[in-house]
Image: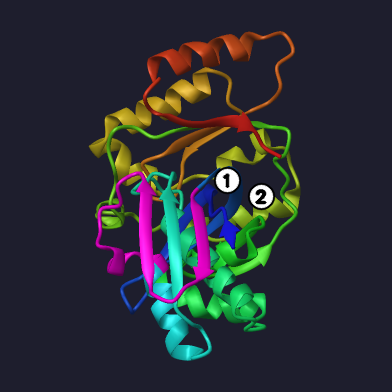
């Protein structure tokens, strides 16, 4: 069974409070991007094997979330047998795109199908929840408004299809710890993203409410990330932001029949040639 674990972008990300358990409550919109994906093949086998290809993953195979999901679900469902896993990493890590979480969720989906576990989306989400706050999102893999630590999901009707998405990952990574260091909580911002969705405005009109609070912490440390965002906006992006805790920055562009935006994007591609990881129209 072959699956293609896709990435996500965050449309706005507000930090609203620090919890007693040390985590932070936040509000965000998760939006799936199917065009940039890893490759995961899982098949029954006599002996366990985990073969990796693509981008070098900076961890042992046993520490990979794919392997952790397999061991966790095997403990819960003894009917899960030995498998051969073939994995190709295409989504950059330390990029705010949720690649590892997507891999974990898709591994759970594969095991559910291969071994006829009959688990619902809700049950699969509970299986992967302990491995990462955004793992449950990739079980549903549809636009969602997220609350809590990012694990309380409400499907939404936001449709960005037809917009051109450009994603640029600079030659640096941002750890989650680094992104949270010195973060300012904005309790007055609670509900802003939900308000933007309720008003049903255009993406441009919604932009003032769709702030990523991590930019306030990350930009002063990594000026190149701030520069990329500004360049995307200068090229005509309707909306540009860092995704998650970084370091990827994305811009959403409308079709420009007069070609001005395309000309500016060509210049952008030349300047950031080694950093553009995705440029396509959203389906």
Based on the picture, tell me whether residue 283 belongs to the magenta stretch. Answer: no
Q: Say whether residue 208 is visible.
A: yes
**For residue 180, side relative to residue 166 (left or right):** left
Residue on which disc 2 sits: 196
Q: Which disc is residue 26 wearing? A: none
Q: Nearer the viewer, residue 119 or 238?
A: 119
Q: Position of residue 34 (x, y in %)?
A: 61, 46
Q: Say above or below: 185 vs 11.
A: below
Q: Which disc is residue 209 wearing? A: 1
- Callout 1: SS: helix
Identify the residue at horizontal 60%, vertical 50% (top origin): 32
Q: Residue lying furthest front in this view?
A: 46
Q: Position of residue 208 (x, y in %)?
A: 57, 40
In the picture, residue 146 is in which quadrant?
A: bottom right
Q: Position of residue 1 (x, y in %)?
A: 59, 63
Q: Nearer the viewer, residue 101 or 233?
A: 101
Identify the residue at horizontal 50%, vertical 18% (top origin): 234
User: Mark 1 vs mark 2: which is more N-terminal?
Assistant: 2
Identify the residue at horizontal 67%, vertical 57% (top origin): 142
* Quarter of the rendering occupied by the C terminus: top right
Tell me how the rendering is colored. Answer: rainbow
Q: Position of residue 46 (x, y in %)?
A: 43, 76
Q: What segment carries the magenta color? A: 38-66
Q: CA distance from mark 1 to mark 2?
A: 6 Å
- Callout 2: SS: helix
Q: Are marks 1 and 2 in contact (CB under 8 Å)?
A: yes
In the picture, residue 52 is in which quadrant?
A: bottom left
Q: Say above or below: 86 vs 109.
A: above
């Amino acid at each position: 069974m072959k699956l293609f674990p896709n990435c996500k972008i965050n449309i706005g990300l507000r930090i609203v409070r620090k919890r007693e358990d040390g985590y932070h409550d936040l509000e965000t919109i998760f939006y799936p991007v199917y065009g940039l994906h890893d490759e995961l093949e899982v098949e029954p086998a006599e002996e366990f094997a985990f073969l990796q290809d693509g981008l070098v993953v900076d961890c042992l195979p046993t520490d990979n979330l794919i392997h952790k999901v397999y061991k966790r679900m095997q403990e819960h469902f003894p009917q899960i047998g030995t498998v051969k896993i073939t994995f190709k990493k295409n989504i950059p890590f330390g990029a705010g795109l949720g690649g590892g979480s997507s891999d974990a969720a898709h591994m759970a989906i594969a095991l559910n199908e291969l071994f006829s576990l009959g688990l619902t989306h809700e049950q699969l989400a509970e299986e992967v929840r302990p491995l990462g706050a955004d793992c449950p999102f990739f079980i549903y893999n549809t636009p969602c408004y997220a609350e809590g630590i990012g694990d309380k999901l409400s499907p939404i009707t936001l449709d960005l299809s037809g917009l051109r998405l450009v994603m640029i990952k600079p030659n640096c990574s941002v750890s989650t710890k680094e992104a949270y260091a010195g973060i300012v909580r904005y309790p007055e911002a609670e509900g802003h993203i939900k308000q933007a969705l309720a008003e049903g405005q255009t993406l441009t009109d919604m932009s003032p409410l769709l702030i990523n609070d991590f930019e306030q912490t990350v930009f002063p440390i990594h000026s190149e990330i701030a520069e990329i965002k500004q360049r995307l906006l200068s090229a005509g992006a309707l909306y540009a932001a860092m995704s998650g805790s970084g370091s990827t920055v994305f811009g959403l562009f409308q079709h420009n029949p007069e070609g001005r935006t395309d000309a500016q994007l060509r210049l952008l591609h030349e300047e950031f040639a080694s950093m553009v990881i995705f440029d396509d129209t959203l389906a």
